[in-house]
């Protein structure tokens, strides 16, 4: 306990009173921005600053979204272009297609198999990197290394490792007396293999985002907890996790979006790129691709894109709820503590 | 040929191609950015015309060939790009046809998807002023329109011979010289009987994959998947079902159950995982790339059922091109007998111009890796032996994907032959 205390002390000395972004609600509308603006309505200024983003978003985000919606209600050949209006015909066709439901199952399954371990491991890595390490930057950059490897290269390397007959993984399994796994025939096995590729690339990235969140947690929380006799594990669950709520929400929502749009890995998982002999690893994006580029049915591909969009929106909301539950103690003790600290600081300022 | 065949050639070459494709992407992104400056001269600068040639895999075209062309045609500059696979080339083609711009002046097309383009043949230059003689029929037919005009130049075909591992046949107590092997594989019954003999002699798998052997047989039928009116007959054609069932019936003892062109398949080509392989001419380079250390791969001048063709490619000139006339001239030259023979020497796609087949330059070509086999005459003979070549319509890719899945489901033990066939029949009904 003493040594822990000492280390924490040293750390808070090195980074004295760094302002915590999460706890600074006045950022962005403080006096410096509006000071000396003369006639301009001070309240409008921040909106002007964020306006460029929304203009760009309207062009590259909103317009394609609406245009895809327009395509999805038409008979639309990839090359010949627009045909007749079919209303919800494309959607009906998709919802009646057995392969769509297989693709939905696979996307959700790969997403869960990839994202849950990814966030758990990333939290552990981030917690480790949050300690006082020698050569901290080196370690932190090292974690990011897999992220800069091309997805194609990752797919090739892992494709070789997960070969059914001569792959490294099955040979190792054989050495310890286990039978070979049908990585390219079994549904769950193929999902695990693809999730491994995804996690290989993304875990380090996620860990760094979480690390950034952790570094913003005021060190005096930990000091106080250590004084109260809370061990590091307890501190992690009662201070770190609740304080990371906003970061976790961000990470989980981006992981949801990314996870349901996995394309490179399943596409390159075998030579055909069509999702397996029985759609074992056919994901929604692969299904979309096959509609548009194999069958040249752009209307149906657009309809699939919209269904995927709706699915992601629904899942993001569900995840938001779950995250709030898991890290929900934020609204309890920690938040009260933080608020009282803030008011205290403000009083001190004025 | 089909996407997976040309998709990934030699293991070694493929990574290079991937790298090339990535480099290409970067370069084209930069080119795209450069276009923002409102330069619309379509690649001609200072009186020089730049022609872009886009191929995939390995067409056997060398820098020296293009340098020669530039020398003979002052004012022309040729730039090349190579996609990693036929499938990548197809995606690129369809996307840019839809966009109405962005295609190279000369684009490569593969036999498995040329029928998809046939519906949009008006987007390509018709073949005119081509002075290099006629093509063999099965190369010309897929790009011949109803009014007898052509919308593409035949690059190459893939006549089939039989490749085998001499050492493995000897170990199983079988003859291993090319003539004896040729006698063994004269028709499909004797081919499968030889497989039984190989298994009885202690050999492991006879052939690499049931799909490859199934496909070689179906390619010898005239209208297995679609009839002349492009109506789908794959599920109702009794011959298709017979080939499917017969091949899968011997698969348990004779197939290595490998996914063609996978890492496993490449490894097994080197480590003796199987003894014979149906060998279109372009497969020679693939085998050499996957098993460069092995010295016992040989080639027999025979194929079950006489002859068969697997694969083929074309060059087309999109009307998008700003220099369609010059591009057509280049495409015509690239597919002339001399260049076809040169490309065959380099990479294995087999010449399809009638005049090239009788050319002494072709007859002289041997292959050192296959024990100095006279591959020029061998594949000329195999071309001679071809009498029926499968018709591939616009649904070919989808039907082929379905049958590939059906065979894989049985080979990997997920389904019985009956269940898998029933599912195939269902899936074919869903193809529009």
Image (cartoon, coloured by chain):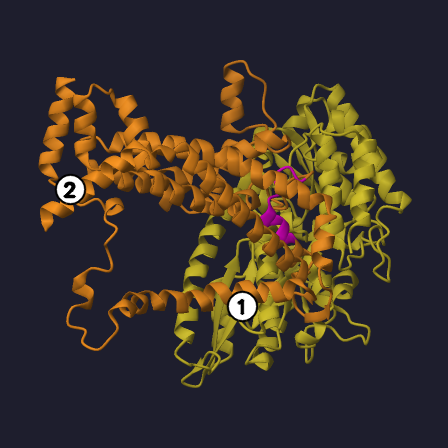
Chain colours: A orange, B yellow
Using the rendered image, report if marks 2 and 1 lie on a common chain. no
Farthest-out residue, bottom: B47
Above or below, B22 relative to A152: below
Above or below, A47 relative to B173: below
Between the residue at mark 2 and the residue at mark 1, the CA separation in whole angstroms equals 71 Å
Disc assigned to residue A344: 2
Task: Say left or right for A205 vs A23.
Answer: right
- Nearest the camera: A262 or B61? A262
- Nearest the camera: A85 or A166? A85
* Marks 2, 1: nearer the viewer: 2
> Where does label 1 land, which residue?
B53
In the rendered image, which quarter is residue B262 located in? top right
* Crowdedness near tag 2: few (<14), some (14–19) or many (≥20) residues, C-alpha within 10 Å: few
The image position of residue B283, as x and y in percent, is 63, 46
Q: Give the residues drawn in magenta, as a range.
A: A279-290
SS at badge 1: strand
Residue at the spot 67% in from the left edge and 46% down from the top edge: A100
Residue A231 visible, this angle: yes
Residue at the spot 47% in from the left edge and 39% down from the top edge: A321
The image position of residue B72, as x and y in percent, is 51, 77
SS at badge 2: helix
Residue at the spot 57% in from the left edge and 76% down from the top edge: B327
The image position of residue B196, as x and y in percent, is 78, 25
Q: Residue A284: within the magenta? A: yes
The image position of residue B286, as x and y in percent, is 58, 45
The subunit carrying tag 1 is B
Q: Residue B314: within the magenta? A: no
């Amino acid at each position: 306990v003493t040594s822990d205390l000492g280390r924490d002390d040293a750390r808070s000395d090195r980074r004295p009173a760094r302002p915590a972004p999460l706890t600074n609600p006045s950022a962005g509308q403080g006096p410096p921005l509006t000071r000396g603006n003369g006639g301009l309505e001070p309240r409008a200024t921040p909106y002007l600053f964020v306006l460029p983003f929304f203009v760009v978003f309207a062009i590259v985000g909103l317009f394609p979204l609406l245009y895809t919606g327009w395509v999805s209600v038409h008979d639309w050949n990839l090359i010949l272009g627009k045909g007749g209006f079919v209303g919800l015909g494309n959607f009906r066709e998709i919802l009646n297609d057995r392969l769509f439901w297989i693709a939905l199952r696979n996307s959700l399954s790969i997403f869960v198999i990839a994202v849950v371990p990814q966030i758990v491991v990333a939290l552990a890595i981030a917690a480790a990197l949050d300690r006082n390490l020698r050569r901290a930057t080196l370690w932190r950059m090292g974690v990011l290394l897999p992220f800069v490897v091309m997805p194609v290269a990752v797919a090739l390397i892992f494709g070789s490792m997960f070969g059914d007959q001569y792959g490294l993984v099955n040979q190792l399994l054989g050495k310890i007396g286990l039978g070979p796994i049908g990585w390219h025939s079994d549904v769950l096995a193929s999902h695990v293999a693809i999730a491994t590729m995804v996690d290989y690339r993304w875990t380090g990235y996620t860990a760094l985002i979480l690390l950034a969140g952790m570094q913003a947690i005021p060190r005096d929380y930990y000091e106080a907890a250590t004084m109260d006799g809370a061990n590091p594990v307890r501190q992690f669950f009662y201070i770190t996790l609740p304080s990371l709520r906003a970061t976790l929400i961000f990470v989980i929502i981006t992981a949801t979006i990314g996870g349901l749009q996995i394309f490179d890995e399943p596409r390159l998982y075998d030579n055909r790129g069509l999702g397996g002999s029985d759609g074992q690893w056919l994901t929604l994006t692969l299904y979309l691709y096959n509609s548009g580029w194999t069958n040249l049915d752009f209307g149906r591909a657009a309809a699939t894109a919209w269904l995927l969009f709706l699915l992601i929106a629904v899942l993001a909301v569900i995840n938001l709820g779950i995250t709030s539950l898991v890290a929900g103690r934020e609204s309890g003790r920690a938040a009260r503590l933080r608020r009282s600290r803030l008011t205290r600081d403000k009083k001190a300022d004025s | 040929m089909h996407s997976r065949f040309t998709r990934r050639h030699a293991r070694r070459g493929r990574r290079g191609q991937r790298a090339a494709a990535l480099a290409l992407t970067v370069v084209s992104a930069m080119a795209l950015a450069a276009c923002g400056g409102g330069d619309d001269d379509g690649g001609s600068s200072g009186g020089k015309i730049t022609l872009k040639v886009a191929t995939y895999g390995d067409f056997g075209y060398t820098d020296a060939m293009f340098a020669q062309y530039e020398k003979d045609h002052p004012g022309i500059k040729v730039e090349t790009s190579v996609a990693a696979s036929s499938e990548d080339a197809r995606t690129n083609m369809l996307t840019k046809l839809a966009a109405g711009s962005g295609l190279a002046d000369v684009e490569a097309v593969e036999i498995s998807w040329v029928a998809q383009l046939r519906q949009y043949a008006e987007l390509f230059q018709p073949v005119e002023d081509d002075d290099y003689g006629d093509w063999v029929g099965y190369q010309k037919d897929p790009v011949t329109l109803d009014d007898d005009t052509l919308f593409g130049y035949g690059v190459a075909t893939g006549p089939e011979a039989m490749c085998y591992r001499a050492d493995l046949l000897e170990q199983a107590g079988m003859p291993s010289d090319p003539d004896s092997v040729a006698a063994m594989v004269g028709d499909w019954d004797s081919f499968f009987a030889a497989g039984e003999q190989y298994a009885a002699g202690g050999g492991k798998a006879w052939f690499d994959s049931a799909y490859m052997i199934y496909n070689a047989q179906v390619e010898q039928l005239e209208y297995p998947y679609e009839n002349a009116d492009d109506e789908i007959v794959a599920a109702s054609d009794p011959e298709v079902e017979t080939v499917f069932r017969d091949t899968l019936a011997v698969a348990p003892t004779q197939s290595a159950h490998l996914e063609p062109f996978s890492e496993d398949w490449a490894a097994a080509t080197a480590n003796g995982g199987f003894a014979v392989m149906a060998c279109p001419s372009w497969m020679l380079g693939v085998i050499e790339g996957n098993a460069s250390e092995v010295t016992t791969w040989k080639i027999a001048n025979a194929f079950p059922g006489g002859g068969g063709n697997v694969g083929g490619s074309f060059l087309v000139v999109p009307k998008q091109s700003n220099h369609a006339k010059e591009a057509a001239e280049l495409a015509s030259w690239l597919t002339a007998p001399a260049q076809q023979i040169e490309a065959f020497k380099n990479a294995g796609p087999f010449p399809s111009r009638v005049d090239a087949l009788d050319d002494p330059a072709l007859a002289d070509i041997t292959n050192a890796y296959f024990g100095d086999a006279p591959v020029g005459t061998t594949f000329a003979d195999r071309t001679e032996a071809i009498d029926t070549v499968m018709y591939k319509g616009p649904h070919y890719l989808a039907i082929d994907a379905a049958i590939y899945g059906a065979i894989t489901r049985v080979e990997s033990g997920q389904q019985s032959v009956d269940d898998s066939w029933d599912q195939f029949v269902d899936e074919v009904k869903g193809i529009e």
